[in-house]
Image (cartoon, grey):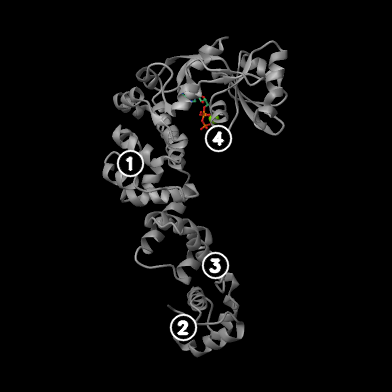
Amino acid sequence: METLFREAKPILEKLHEAGYQAYFVGGAVRDLLLNREIGDLDIATSAKPAIIQQLFEKTIDVGAEHGTIIVLHNKRSYEVTTFRTESAYEDFRRPSQVTFISSLKEDLRRRDFTINSMAMDIDGNLYDYFDGQQHLNDRMIQTVGKASERFSEDALRMLRAIRFVSQLQFSLNGDTKTAIIQNVSLLKNISTERKTVEFEKMLSGVHHQKALQIMIDTRVYVYLPGLDSKRTQLLRFSQYNLSMLKSREEQWTMFVHHMEIESIDLFLKEWKLPSKLIQSVVKNVALLHNLRHTDWTSLTLYQAGLITAMQVERVRLTLSLRTDNNDQLMGLETLYNNLPIKARDQLAVSGNDIVKVINQKPGPWISKVLAILEKKVIDGELENEKQAMKEWLLTCKQDFDPNY
Ligand code: ATP
Ligand code: MG
């Protein structure tokens, strides 16, 4: 059994000792069987939330009314959830009520896809009531029970299905796909935040091209922020392999670049993305645009800074379908490292020095002079050395009108 599972065994043991059932469930079991890296380890138990809180020293109540308590153990956190069935789905999203039960099988039945509906006990025995293993072998995403019912209970599952296609390189079962087409309009009931999480996971998956194609075929995209009229743009976007993109900033830059949007800022706000991310993407897209017909110069590189430059370059390489990208990226990094200065405060003269040489009343003009010096140094026209710079300032002293 994987280390992560071994580390969590004491939690199951404690629940067993207190007379309760407890199993590893869901994504972690799926990923263990697929030999994939395991994200979070979830545990399902017959113990009610109050009992879980009593049994463990450190817990966080993240939704006791839905049965979920986080247990902290050896610096890791585990979601421990009471066996439950979900009833009274309201507005096609999460259930408004849950009923705690004592049957593992019934708990597994409420889960979205067969591959996510398996449990494993403390000894590594698998509990697979809904053909999860078979569908892992077939590499197939299929709902537990009737797809149409399961999607009308919780429409988010349609997006989850597509992102699993991307992450796991699986196919959508035919009925599951048909049910998405039939129920797609229910996605309007799902919060943007939850859509964004799934969309980002989809973009990061290996099979994003296939997943995007499914989003187009099923018309899921119509219910994503700002995309209802972007079919053609999405089709074009889906032709690219995004695997070189390393960050959310890069993925959103590439995406926004293709969507042909008037206000990038408003578009990304619609997706409810954090403002820092939005700012970076706006900056990246502008730079990408400027670099359409030219290559990097020392000055554009300096102005962008290394992080932004590398982000934009990875997007540029993705767009150009180039394969020798590592050399290109390393070349850019070397160019950056060889810049004579990395920031204005590294100039050998300060604002004070300039005032002394030019002998005028200080004012906003100083910053303009600094910008000129900065550009000259970056372009290699002037050495970043105090004496040389002072001499150059003297030669053009008369050109600086402090009133401008
Ligand atoms: P990831 O690798 O992204 O964590 P995961 O399968 O673990 O994938 P989670 O969102 O962590 O997904 O959910 C844990 C488990 O809870 C799932 O494996 C599934 O069994 C169940 N689950 C999650 N969301 C839903 C849902 N909307 N409807 C039904 N079951 C769900
Ligand atoms: Mg998970």
Alpha carbon separation for disc pair 2 and 1: 49 Å
Above/below status of 2 relative to 250: above
**Residue 41 occupies which quadrant of the picture?**
top right
Q: Amino acid at mark 1?
A: Gly
Above/below status of 107 relative to 37: above
Residue under pointer 3: 334
Q: Residue at x 57, y 36 (%)?
A: 37
Foreground tag (1 vs 3): 3
**Residue 122 occupies which quadrant of the picture?**
top right
The picture places residue 176, in percent across and down from the top left corner, at: 36, 24
Q: Amino acid at mark 4?
A: Arg
Q: Which mark is residue 226?
A: 1
Q: Amino acid at mark 3?
A: Thr
Q: Amino acid at mark 2?
A: Phe
Above/below status of 390 relative to 8: below
The picture places residue 380, in percent across and down from the top left corner, at: 51, 79
Q: Residue at x 59, y 31 (%)?
A: 40
Alpha carbon separation for disc pair 1 and 4: 34 Å
- Tag 2's secondary structure? loop
Residue under pointer 2: 400
Foreground tag (4 vs 3): 4
Work out whether mark 2 precedes mark 4 in sequence or the reverse, and give the earlier one: 4
Foreground tag (3 vs 2): 3
- Tag 1's secondary structure? loop
Residue under pointer 4: 36
- Neighbourhood count class around disc 3 (C-alpha, 10 Å): few under 14, some 14–19, many 20 upward: few
Work out whether mark 1 precedes mark 3 in sequence or the reverse, and give the earlier one: 1
